[in-house]
């Protein structure tokens, strides 16, 4: 997962960390196309401007799915965020 630091490389097929901007483009493209879209990984990679390959996009998505699964099954504690508002 990304720590928010910039990518070490912007070339396709780079296994570098994902920048905040790349994560945002990834999220927006997933929301736009939906996870059941045909050729999803290619579409998301293209929407990201080619900074990541379709395979990198697929792997990134799988890592997120695995993280959510681990959190939901109690293998990773739910993060405690510092928040403000009426719910705190």
Image (cartoon, grey):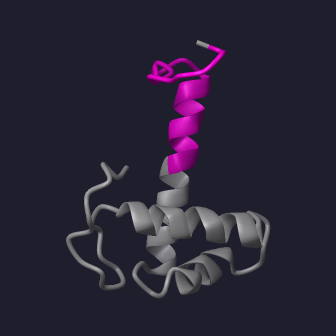
Q: Position of residue 51 (x, y in %)?
A: 40, 82
Q: Position of residue 30 (x, y in %)?
A: 67, 66
Q: What is the quadrant of the C terminus in the image?
A: top right
Q: Position of residue 61 (x, y in %)?
A: 55, 58
Q: Give the left or right position of residue 62, taking residue 1 as reference.
A: right
Q: Position of residue 21 (x, y in %)?
A: 42, 67
Report the number of numbered marks: 0
Residue in the image at 51% along x and 80% along y: 48
Q: Is residue 41 magenta?
A: no
Magenta-colored segment: predominant secondary structure: loop
- Of residue 24 and residue 51, the one placed in the foreground of this image is 24
Q: Is residue 70 magenta?
A: yes
Quadrant housing residue 6: bottom left
- Of residue 28 and residue 37, the one placed in the foreground of this image is 28
Residue at the top extreme of this rendering: 88
Q: Give the left or right position of residue 37, taking residue 80 as reference.
A: right
Quadrant housing residue 10: bottom left
68 up-or-down from 56: above or below? above
The magenta stretch is 64-87
Residue in the image at 56% along x and 86% along y: 46
Quadrant housing residue 28: bottom right
């Amino acid at each position: 997962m990304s720590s928010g630091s910039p990518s070490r490389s912007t070339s396709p097929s780079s296994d570098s960390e994902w920048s905040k901007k790349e994560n945002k483009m990834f999220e927006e493209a997933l929301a736009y196309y939906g996870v059941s879209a045909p050729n999803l990984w290619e579409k998301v990679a293209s929407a990201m401007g080619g900074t990541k390959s379709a395979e990198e996009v697929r792997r990134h998505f799988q890592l997120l799915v695995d993280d959510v699964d681990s959190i939901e099954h109690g293998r990773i504690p739910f993060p405690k965020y510092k928040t403000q508002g009426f719910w705190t």
